């Protein structure tokens, strides 16, 4: 099951890569009213930083999304964002699927206490779901916030921002 989660996450990141490649820098950086003034690049940065925190936890055993590194280059430079996606995809491929149940400590800065027990599998599902949420927002920004999205940005958007469970349901692969 963890391998399937890794594979579907990689597919979602590949879709994000395709989207970034299709965008010019002004569109990537433009604040959009429909996104409360945020840009598509800002949503991409936010999503990717959760993956970077996750990969750090896979190596260190402790995860805190609140203390993630916030790198403005991801939101302003599509080329740097593409490099970051490639780094994340490579890092996820290095995780042994047998580590799905490996315990990690989830710290939450704004809560008192020693953190919460979690697993690599559970947190990968979370960061994938987090990417899905922001992908849906990105899709809304692209389709309804940009004045003239490029045709290559529209092609292939049917699956972008749609949950793997929804795609499976729609294709008749119900559990």
Image: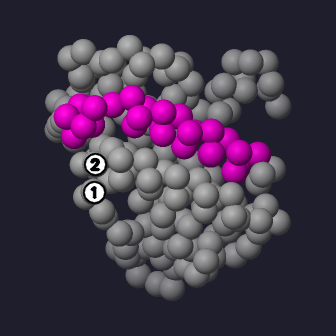
Residue 18 visible: yes
Residue 65 place in picture, x, y as percent: 43, 67
Residue shown at 49%/45% (left/top)? 131
Instruction: Confirm whether the magenta stretch covers residue 13.
Output: yes
Quick check: 138 above or below 42? above
Residue 147: which quarter of the image? top left
Rendering coords of residue 31 (x, y %): 17, 37
**Residue at 67% from the left image edge and 41% from the top image edge:** 8
Q: Residue furthest bottom?
A: 114
Mark 2–mark 1 contact, CB under 8 Å?
A: yes
**Residue situated in front as seen by the camera: 105 or 10:** 10
Q: Residue at x 33, y 44 (%)?
A: 78
Q: Is residue 175 left or right of residue 170?
A: right
- The foreground one among 66 and 159 is 159
Question: Relative to the observer, which residue lies in front, 96 or 119?
Answer: 96
Quadrant (top left, top right, bottom left, bottom right) of the C terminus: top right
Q: Which mark is residue 77?
A: 2
Residue 112 found in image quarter? bottom left
Residue 50 percent coordinates (x, y): 46, 59
The magenta span reads: 4-29
Give the image location of residue 162, x and y in percent.
55, 29
SS state under label 1 = helix
Which quarter of the figure has residue 59?
bottom right
Q: Which residue is mark 1?
A: 73
Numbered-mark total: 2
């Amino acid at each position: 099951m963890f391998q399937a989660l890794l594979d579907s996450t990689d597919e979602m990141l590949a879709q994000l890569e395709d989207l970034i490649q299709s965008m010019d820098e002004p569109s990537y950086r433009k604040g959009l009213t429909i996104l409360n003034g945020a840009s598509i690049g800002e949503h991409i940065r936010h999503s990717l930083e959760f993956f970077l925190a996750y990969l750090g936890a896979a190596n260190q055993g402790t995860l805190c999304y609140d203390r993630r590194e916030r790198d403005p280059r991801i939101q302003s430079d599509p080329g740097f964002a593409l490099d970051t996606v490639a780094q994340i995809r490579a890092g996820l491929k290095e995780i042994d699927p047998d580590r799905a149940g490996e315990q990690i400590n989830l710290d939450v800065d704004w809560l008192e206490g020693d953190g919460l027990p979690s697993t690599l599998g559970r947190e990968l599902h979370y960061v994938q779901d987090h990417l899905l949420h922001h992908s849906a927002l990105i899709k809304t920004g692209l389709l309804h916030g940009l004045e003239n999205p490029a045709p290559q940005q529209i092609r292939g958007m049917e699956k972008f921002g749609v949950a793997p469970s929804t795609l499976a349901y729609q294709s008749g692969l119900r559990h």
